[in-house]
Every structure is written in structure tokens, then in C-alpha cells.
Amino acid sequence: MKKKILSGILSAVMAASLLAGCGQAAQTTTETPAAEPAATEAPAAEPAAEPAAEPAAAGGGKVGVAMPTKDLQRWNQDGANMEEQLKAAGYEVDLQYASNDIATQVSQIENMISSGAQVLVIASIDGDSLGTVLAQAKEAGIKVIAYDRLIMNSDAVSYYATFDNYMVGTKQGEYIEQQLDLKNAAGPFNMEIFTGDPGDNNARFFYGGAIDVLKPYIDEGKIVVKSGQVDFDKVATANWATENAQSRMDAIISANYADGTKLDAVLCSNDSTALGVTNSLEANYTGEWPIITGQDCDVANVKNMIAGKQSMSIFKDTRTLAAKTVEMVDAIMKGTDAPVNDTKTYDNGTGIIPSYLCEPVFADVNNYKELLIDSGYYTEDQLK
């Protein structure tokens, strides 16, 4: 794993890094209902006489974009930004959402392959679930860009476009460290931990970055996790689902904080888990409000931040990631190497995947207007 990245001074540096961050006719954007997934993957087609993905002139060709679900705000934004920027660059776009159903995503990718996509951009539901269908893509000469979530155990993956996921966790851990003044305060402070889906490789990077900051304080007893749930497998949240995080937090509060014991911080790896934690605290907790971290700057969570219910959220500007991915697509279509800035960190089980890592920043009540409103990401009305 990538060695720990120090954040520096918080708000000013984070805002500055955002500014330094890292597109003809399109098919209908749809989300296939999960109720009708393909039961099994179709048999691989007979090998084509010629590869399907010949280098194309700039601004021509078809790109398949597979997104996991419309249930989370961030994937809607990712898909919309990708589609807009690819169309602006002159590409035909087949954008599909899979309702968080693996068989549906496999079927959608098969259809993209058979309908002539020359590049696939895939945000996988489960990083280990696409080996067979991507073998078909490789056989057809189609390049694959793993988008934000690394696709595991497939040698068909050509590139990875994402944010620095270890840094995301580092910034969350350092935020808690600074807000609790852990370097100087005596403690002990009570903290609970919520990370993401165990099938999402990113969740381990988020968790690892934060735990590398906070575990020394846990080991010395300055931070106490009263539930005893610290290991990744114990704090993972299936599907990143708000209701799963809320249910687990309900149980933690009932067992450990119902007697008035103070909860000082909750490390949440993203906004959907933070929302579940917040919902549970509002319903069950009567003590002083804890520090709560998050990621994605979803509208509901920014509203909670403004209201004092969530302390911060990592801002990953999907416009920036989409723009970098379009650059990668354009390079592939021209038959050249895509731009990358990391060739050491991300091994998907078949070798290191050349990657482009955009730098995340954090938003809190002090800088959200600059990052989110002044940049045009949201309007003020959206956050009222």
C-alpha cells in the first residue's frame, strides 16, 4: 500500500489542491431494473477476425460507460459528467446503470461489446465479478478503464482512473486527529468506525489511510472503540447502504452509549454511511454531538454539515475525474498511451495497473461555499 501522505495545513491547502486537479449522438441513458438481470453470462462469441477496437480519429468512436447504480447521488453525477464530456469530445456514448446488480452489469457490458464499443469505462459493482466478460472485451481488442473502483483479477484492465483513495482516508483520520487534538489532549475519547462495501477495493484504501493515522492512538488507549469493532471485516458496510450503517449504529448505541456515555467521533468512509450514522444518532443518542466524517459531498450531507450534524466530507470533484478519463479515452482512441501518474500502487491481482490519481480535498462549514458553490458544483438553492 502506498505510504502515508501528510495533508499539511487543512483548509487553504485543500482548496488550492482542488484548483490544481487533475467531454455524436448518444444512446439513451438507462438503468436496467435489477428484477430482470441476466441469469448467467452469455457464452463468449467466436473470435473476431479483426480486433473491434482499431485506433480512431480524435472525436470519433463509441465509448461504453458502465456505472453501478443510480441509488447514490455521486454515481449520477459521475455518469452525467462522463457522458457530457465524452459527447463534447465527439464520441458516441452508451451509458448504463446496473441497479447494483452484478448480473445486470455483466449483461450491459456484453451488450456494449457486441454493439461496437471501442473503449469501456467501468465503475464495477464488485471488483471481482467481471473476469469472464472482460476476457471477451480483451479478445475483441477493446481497452478497459476501471473508473474509481479497481477491477480485480482481470488482465483486460488497461488503466485505472480514480482519486487518491489512501489520501481520502488519511485526510479523514487527520481531521479527527486535529479536531480532538489527539497529539496533545489526554483523552480518552470514544470513537466508532464505519467503512464501505467489502467488495469495493477502494473501501480498504479509505480504511487503511484513516487507520494508519488513528491506530496509534487506539493502541495507547487515547481513543477507545467501545463496541470493540475495529477490524475491516467488522466495520464494513454492505453496498455502502445508509440503512445498513443506521442499523449497525442503532445496535452500537444501544449496547454502549444508551447510558449517556459520550461518543466523541465517528469515522465514516463516505456520505451514505455518515447519513445512516446521523439518522441513528438523531433517533437514539442524547449526548453531545460527535465529530462525523464523510466523503462525496452529497447534497443531504452538505446540508447536515451546514446544520452542524456532520463535520466534514471529502470532496472528489467528479468533473475533474471525468475530464481526466476523457483524456485517457482520447489517447486510447488515437492509439497512444493514456496519461498516468502512478505505476506502483494499484495491483489488481494480475499486476500493477497504470493509474491516474486525482487529489481529493475536504469540505467543512468553513470552506464549502468556496469549494462547492463558487466552483459551480452546486447552487446555493440546492443546499437550502
Image (cartoon, helix red, strand yellow):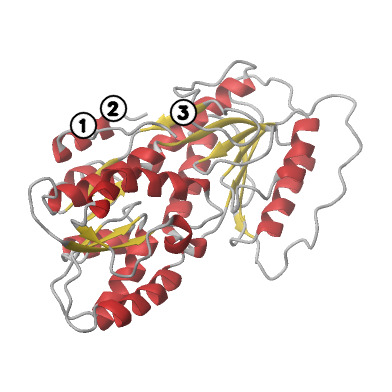
Instruction: Determine if residue 32 is in view.
Output: yes
Mark nearer the viewer, 3 or 2: 3
Residue of label 1 = 16
Q: Quadrant of residue 264?
A: bottom left
77, 171: nearer the viewer: 171
Q: Earlier in the sequence, mark 3 or mark 1?
A: 1
Q: Residue placed at 20% from the left, 48% from the top? A: 175
Q: Residue placed at 66% from the left, 32% from the top? A: 350
Quadrant showing the N terminus: top left
Q: Amino acid at mark 1?
A: Ala
Residue of label 2 = 20
314 left or right of 331?
left
Distance between the Cα atoms at labels 3 and 2? 14 Å
Count neighbours of disc 1 (C-alpha within 10 A) and say few if under 14, some if 14 to 19, many if 20 or more: few
Q: Secondary structure at mark 3?
A: strand
74 left or right of 65?
left
Q: Amino acid at mark 3?
A: Tyr
